[in-house]
Image: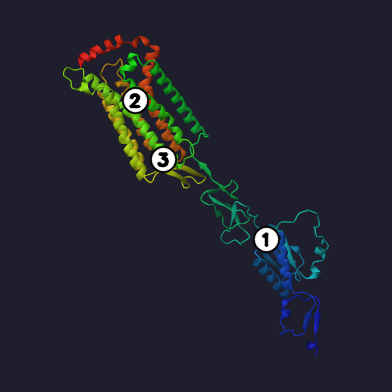
């Protein structure tokens, strides 16, 4: 009859009694250990204890409870470092449990869940204060690994539980903005991680600017050379009726000086933020101005050659001398370059482009065209004119040297060609604003070569040796050579 008597328990928490087929008359006034384990798992989450140990005794009820507790902890995302099962009723000597004690001491788990019968918790219960036996004023930590702060990601080594991981910095171009992220996020194309790699920031826009030391230096040289050219132009205007100015074709000298002055101002189109209008003007303006300068030198050389050849008896070249020939050469050469530039703009119009691929941490703002054919065609034409002029200057190098520019033209064209031939590999190997800086340097260097080689010697004669700037000296210096010709 006793087996059919209802039984009410206030201490049995084992879930085995939930089976009504086996225990139809069993009732309890306390929750099961499943409810208790669920509360413990939630408590671990609340305090951030991700790496804990479990100690229990070798009794069926406690073992089942501990296994259920471990499953719930793992299901909640935390980890169990160990489950120690002690046979407390058999040995009370602590040396018997040395292996278990060593495991507890060596483990990183600082929180241990003890699932023991009440009679074994008397000493633990004497320290029941919520702050522990010594007040530390902070929540104890029990983790296998420290949290991965923003800027890092979690990597779980093979064979490790999910709570034991390494913190790896996010790769270049990636961020993590939440603690313990498993994967980093890639920044948008025009953004870049900050120094902590926890947020994306806008990339810097990179172009050759007057705010840069490089850009400001090039602008300073451009202004200096412009001022020098303007000063020489003023000297030539003041001394326009002197033999040395008139002997070297005064109008061509003016044209060359003005074109060189404009060439020195061309770098200001290359320094600054590229726009559609700037991209269209850059190469066209420079190419046309430079063609005028080089063709003026070509016209000078042809004029000198024809002038001295026409002094021979019966020469038919005398009708080709004069201003008309010089003007014809300059206009013809410039019109050819204008045609090339027009074709280049129609076929391959340049436009401002935002390059996000060359550098990962900044955007290069530059002018590019659909093809480089137009660029090399316009520059190739100028180089061809220069080589042709170099050949002409070489032919007239033995003409009277007092006012003959052949030596200076030869050297200036040699310098000019050297600059632009070396410009090609330097331009192709440079990136971003340094590519623009290489072209600006080539413009300034080649223009300065023409200016210094052709006009500085004349200015030295005009200002420092005025006794040589006379018709008598000109006539005397010309006689032997004219006779030899």
Neighbor class of circle 3 (other Cα within 10 Å; few <14, some 14-19, many 20+) is some
Mark 3 vs 1: CB contact within 8 A = no
- For disc 2, the marked residue is 412
Residue sitting at 42 percent across and 23 percent down?
A: 229
Location of mark 3 (residue)? 280
In the image shown, does 126 or 34 lie closer to the viewer?
34
Could you tell which of marks 3 and 2 lies nearer the N-terminus? 3
Residue matched to label 1: 51
Q: Is residue 151 above or below residue 272?
A: below
Could you tell me residue 467's position as x and y percent?
A: 35, 9
Local SS, label 2: helix
Given residues 324 and 230, the one toward you in this image is 324
> In this picture, is 424 found above or below 140?
above
Say if residue 393 shows up in the picture: no
In front: mark 3 or mark 2? 3
Name above or below for residue 232 compared with residue 287: above
Q: Secondary structure at mark 1?
A: strand
């Amino acid at each position: 009859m006793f087996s059919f008597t209802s039984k009410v328990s206030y201490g049995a928490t084992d879930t085995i009694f939930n089976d009504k087929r086996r225990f139809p008359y069993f009732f309890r006034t306390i929750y099961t250990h499943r409810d208790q384990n669920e509360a413990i798992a939630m408590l671990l989450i609340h305090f951030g204890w991700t790496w804990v140990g479990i100690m229990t005794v070798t009794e069926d009820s406690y073992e089942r409870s501990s296994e259920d507790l471990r499953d719930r902890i793992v299901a909640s995302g935390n980890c169990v470092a160990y489950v120690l099962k002690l046979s407390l009723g058999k040995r009370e000597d602590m040396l018997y449990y040395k292996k278990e004690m060593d495991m507890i001491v060596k483990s990183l788990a600082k929180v241990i869940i003890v699932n023991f019968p009440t009679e074994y918790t008397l000493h633990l219960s004497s320290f029941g204060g919520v702050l522990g036996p010594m007040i530390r004023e902070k929540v104890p930590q029990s983790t296998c690994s420290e949290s991965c702060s923003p800027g890092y990601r979690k990597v779980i080594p093979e064979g490790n539980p999910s709570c034991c991981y390494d913190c790896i910095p996010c790769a270049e171009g990636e961020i993590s903005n939440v603690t313990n992220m498993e994967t980093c996020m890639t920044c948008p194309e025009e953004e870049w991680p900050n120094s902590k790699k926890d947020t994306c920031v806008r990339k810097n826009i990179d172009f050759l600017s007057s705010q840069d030391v490089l850009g400001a230096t090039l602008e300073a040289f451009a202004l200096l050379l412009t001022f020098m050219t303007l000063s020489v132009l003023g000297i030539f205007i003041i001394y326009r009726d002197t033999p040395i100015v008139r002997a070297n074709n005064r109008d061509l000298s003016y044209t060359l000086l003005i074109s060189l002055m404009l060439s020195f101002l061309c770098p200001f189109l290359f320094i600054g933020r590229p726009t559609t209008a700037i991209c269209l003007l850059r190469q066209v303006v420079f190419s046309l101005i430079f063609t005028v300068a080089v063709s003026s030198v070509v016209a000078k050389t042809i004029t000198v050659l024809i002038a001295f050849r026409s002094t021979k008896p019966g020469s038919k070249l005398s009708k080709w001398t004069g201003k008309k020939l010089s003007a014809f050469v300059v206009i013809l050469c410039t019109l050819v370059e204008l045609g090339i530039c027009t074709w280049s703009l129609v076929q391959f119009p340049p436009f401002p482009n935002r390059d996000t691929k060359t550098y990962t941490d900044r955007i290069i703002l530059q002018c590019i065209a659909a093809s480089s054919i137009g660029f090399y065609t316009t520059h190739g034409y100028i180089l061809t004119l220069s080589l042709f002029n170099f050949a002409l200057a070489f032919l007239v190098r033995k003409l009277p040297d007092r006012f003959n520019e052949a030596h200076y033209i030869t050297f200036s064209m040699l310098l000019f060609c050297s600059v632009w031939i070396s410009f090609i590999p330097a331009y192709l190997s440079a990136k971003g604003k340094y590519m623009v800086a290489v072209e600006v340097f080539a413009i300034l260097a080649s223009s300065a070569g023409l200016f210094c080689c052709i006009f500085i010697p004349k200015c030295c004669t005009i200002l420092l040796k005025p006794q040589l700037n006379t018709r008598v000296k000109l006539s005397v210096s010309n006689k032997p050579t004219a006779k030899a010709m």
